[in-house]
Image (spheres, rainbow, N blue to C red):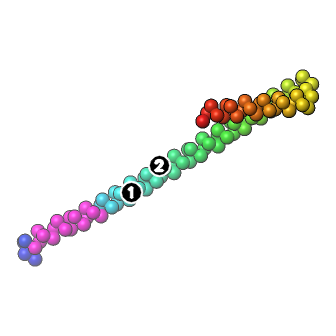
């Protein structure tokens, strides 16, 4: 190779090496973003499960409270059904406020 030919090849080699490096950086960045996305999804799933557990506990407590009230007050079946309907309406209203 002449000096001129050698200088013409150098930028190409450097450019190829640079492109390979950039591809490696991009691939590494994509893996890092993917890992963070997976961690975030796991945290979100865990929070959703916890919230469902909490809502189940709240619903169970409401039912226990209603059952105790029905028993203590000696409500008739019709009165108990009406109380359940009112409670269902209150729950629906609460859900609408959250959305």
- Residue 27: where, in percent of width, then height? 38, 59
Up the image or down, 61 lies above or below 29; here it is above
Local packing at callout 2 (Cα closer than 10 Å; few below 14, some 14-19, many 20+) is few
Magenta portion: prevailing SS class: helix
- Label whose residue precedes the other's in the sequence (1 or 2): 1
**Quadrant in the rendering for residue 70:** top right
For image coordinates 90% across by 31% down, the residue present is: 78
In the image, residue 92 lies at what x, y percent?
A: 70, 34
Query: Between marks 1 and 2, how big is the CA–CA gap?
Result: 12 Å
Q: Is residue 62 left or right of residue 11?
A: right
Which residue is identified by label 1? 28
Picture coordinates of residue 93 (x, y %)?
68, 31
- Asked if the magenta segment contains residue 8, the reply would be yes
Question: Is the residue 78 above or below the residue 15 in the image?
Answer: above
* Closest to the observer, 13 or 54: 54
Looking at the image, the residue that sits furthest to the left is 3
Q: Nearer the viewer, residue 55 or 78?
A: 78
Of 97 and 21, the residue lying toward us: 97
Circle 2 residue? 36
Residue 76 visible at all? yes
With respect to residue 43, does 83 lie above or below?
A: above
Q: Residue at image x 72%, y 38%?
A: 56
Residue 97 is a magenta residue: no
Residue at 24% across, 66% down: 16
Identify the residue at horizontal 56%, vertical 48% (top origin): 42
Give SS at disc 2: helix
Mark 1: which secondary structure? helix
Q: Which residues are magenta?
A: 5-20
Q: Is residue 70 left or right of residue 10?
A: right
Left or right placement of residue 61 versus residue 23 in this view: right
């Amino acid at each position: 190779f002449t000096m001129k030919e050698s200088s013409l090849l150098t930028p190409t080699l450097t450019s190829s090496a640079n492109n390979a490096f950039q591809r490696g950086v991009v691939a590494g960045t994509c893996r890092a973003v993917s890992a963070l996305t997976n961690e975030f999804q796991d945290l979100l799933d865990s929070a959703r499960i916890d919230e469902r557990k909490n809502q189940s506990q709240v619903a169970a407590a409401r039912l226990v409270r209603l059952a105790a009230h029905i028993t203590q007050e000696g409500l008739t079946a019709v009165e108990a059904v009406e109380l359940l309907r009112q409670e269902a309406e209150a729950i629906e209203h609460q859900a609408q406020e959250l959305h």
